[in-house]
Image (cartoon, grey):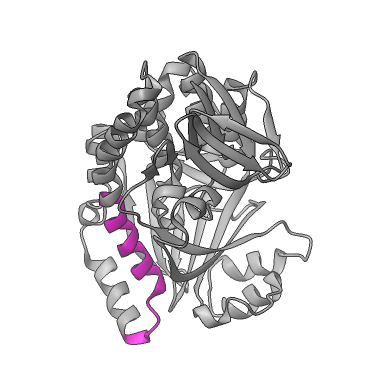
């Protein structure tokens, strides 16, 4: 088949590697100038790793990753509320790693090094008839494919062309991501600090740097207001303690900071005709779930299985089977994501006090229960 993949992120590149192996002709377009950016830190459990075993890159991923066995939950002051011990899950389901986004991106790019990626290019229009899917691209070209896969993220142009604004909703939170020098006091394990309508996550990297995520509740009416990132973060997180004041003092106007809003995507159907969605384009959840990358890899794995040896005449049945297999799993993740969004966005001080007290008193095993459904049934 002649396949267009829209998006050169984890899911798009992994799918390209699978389909290239099966002999399909692949075209990849990507709206960014290049995906070789610094990125952030991603969490990768066994459910994501196993999808890449076919390509022999798991040991390379391990060598570039930081293993995680514990995570610390803190009040915004830095006081420890809970310690999450991942060892029971690791013993049952396998290791969990923190991996630089750029490292996994580079590994996947190498798997598809023979497939050119057309950067700064996206979909303008899609139309389908008995001869195929006709696309018009932003570079002015018009081409026809047997299948178009939208792996173009939360703000998917493919999804917009298929379903308009259906299925995407602002979750009330804005986030800022950055990679910062670790320094002598930097934690060597993940730490999560909870305030009232604010959250900070700190994630160590193997190169001595750490990923820092600032998350804050922002009313939708304020989203259009101009924001100077460093000044806003200084003001919004001024009452956080522990290592946060030092981190804020170290931020400069030149510090690379990625900002976006948290949107959740939930659609009743992920395909129309011979156009299908994958990863965040189909089912985006909160970044605090630390499962978006793994879910995209699982999607690619399952979609490739359904497309294996399929002929174009039965393509829609394959897309339906892919969605049927994946939907229950991503709905399980949505429950966890909804809870984490609530956890991070509690604003009322009294409710935040109760949240903190409950996290302090709950057994660690209870805090891990939301993870187990995601790890029990692999794609």
Residue 334 drawn in magenta: yes
Q: Is residue 305 left or right of residue 224?
A: left
Q: Which of 139 and 364 is in front in this view?
A: 139
Quadrant in which the C terminus appears: top left
State the extent of the magenta-drawn residues as a range.
332-350
Residue 274 is drawn in which quadrant? top left
Q: Position of residue 186 (x, y in %)?
A: 58, 53
| 227 or 72, nearer to the observer | 227
Left or right position of 98 against 265: right
Residue at the extreme front of the image, as rendered:
130
Q: Which residue is drawn at 57% across and 65% down?
A: 243
Which residue sits at x=49%, y=13%? 23
Residue 220 place in picture, x, y as percent? 51, 78
Say if 238 sits above or below 258 in the image.
below
Q: Which of 43 and 148 is in front in this view?
A: 148
Name the main secondary structure of what is drawn in magenta.
helix
The quarter of the picture where residue 288 lies is: bottom left
Could you tell me if residue 265 is visible in this image? yes
When the figure is inspected, residue 134 is found, relative to residue 187, above or below; the finding is above
Q: Nearer the viewer, residue 247 or 132?
A: 132
Q: How many labels does the image show?
A: 0
Q: Is residue 188 left or right of residue 44?
A: right
| x and y, in percent, of residue 291 in the image | 40, 46
Residue 302 shown in magenta: no
Residue at coordinates 44% horizontally, 77% vertically from top-left? 197
Question: What residue lies at 54% left-to-right and 60% top-to-bottom?
Answer: 213
One can see residue 65 in this view:
no
Q: Give the percent coordinates (x, y) of residue 61.
A: 51, 28
């Amino acid at each position: 088949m002649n396949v267009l993949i829209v998006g050169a992120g984890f899911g798009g590149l992994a799918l390209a590697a699978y389909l290239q192996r099966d002999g399909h002709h692949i075209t990849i377009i990507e709206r960014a100038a290049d995906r070789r950016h610094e990125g952030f830190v991603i969490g990768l459990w066994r459910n994501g790793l196993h999808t890449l075993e076919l390509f022999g890159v798991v040991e390379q991923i391990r060598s570039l990753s930081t293993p995680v066995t514990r995570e610390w939950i803190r009040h915004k002051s830095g006081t420890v509320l809970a310690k999450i011990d991942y060892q029971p899950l690791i013993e049952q389901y396998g290791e969990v790693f923190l991996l630089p986004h750029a490292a996994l991106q580079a590994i996947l790019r190498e798997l598809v090094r023979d497939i050119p990626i057309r950067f700064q290019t996206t979909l303008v229009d899609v139309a389908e008839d008995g001869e195929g899917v006709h696309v018009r691209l932003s570079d002015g070209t018009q081409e026809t494919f047997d299948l178009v896969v939208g792996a173009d993220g939360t703000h998917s142009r493919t999804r917009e062309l298929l379903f308009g604004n259906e299925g995407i909703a602002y979750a009330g939170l804005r986030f800022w991501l950055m990679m910062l020098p670790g320094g002598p006091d930097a934690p060597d394990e993940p730490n999560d600090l909870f305030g009232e309508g604010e959250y900070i996550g700190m994630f160590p990297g193997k190169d001595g740097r750490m990923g820092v995520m600032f998350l804050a509740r922002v009313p939708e009416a304020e989203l259009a207001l101009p924001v100077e990132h460093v000044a806003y973060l200084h003001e919004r997180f001024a009452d956080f303690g522990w290592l946060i004041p030092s981190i804020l003092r170290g931020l400069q106007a030149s510090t690379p900071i990625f900002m976006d809003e948290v949107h959740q995507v939930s659609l009743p159907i992920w395909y129309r005709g011979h156009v299908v969605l994958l990863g965040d384009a189909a089912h985006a959840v909160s970044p605090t779930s630390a499962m978006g990358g793994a879910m995209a890899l699982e999607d690619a794995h399952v979609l490739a299985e359904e497309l294996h040896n399929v002929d174009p005449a039965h393509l829609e049945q394959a897309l339906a089977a892919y969605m049927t297999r994946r939907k229950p799993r991503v709905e399980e993740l949505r429950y966890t994501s909804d809870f984490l969004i609530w956890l991070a966005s509690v604003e009322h001080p009294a409710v935040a006090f109760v949240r903190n007290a409950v996290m302090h008193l709950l057994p660690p095993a209870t805090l891990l229960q939301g993870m187990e459904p995601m790890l029990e049934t692999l794609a």
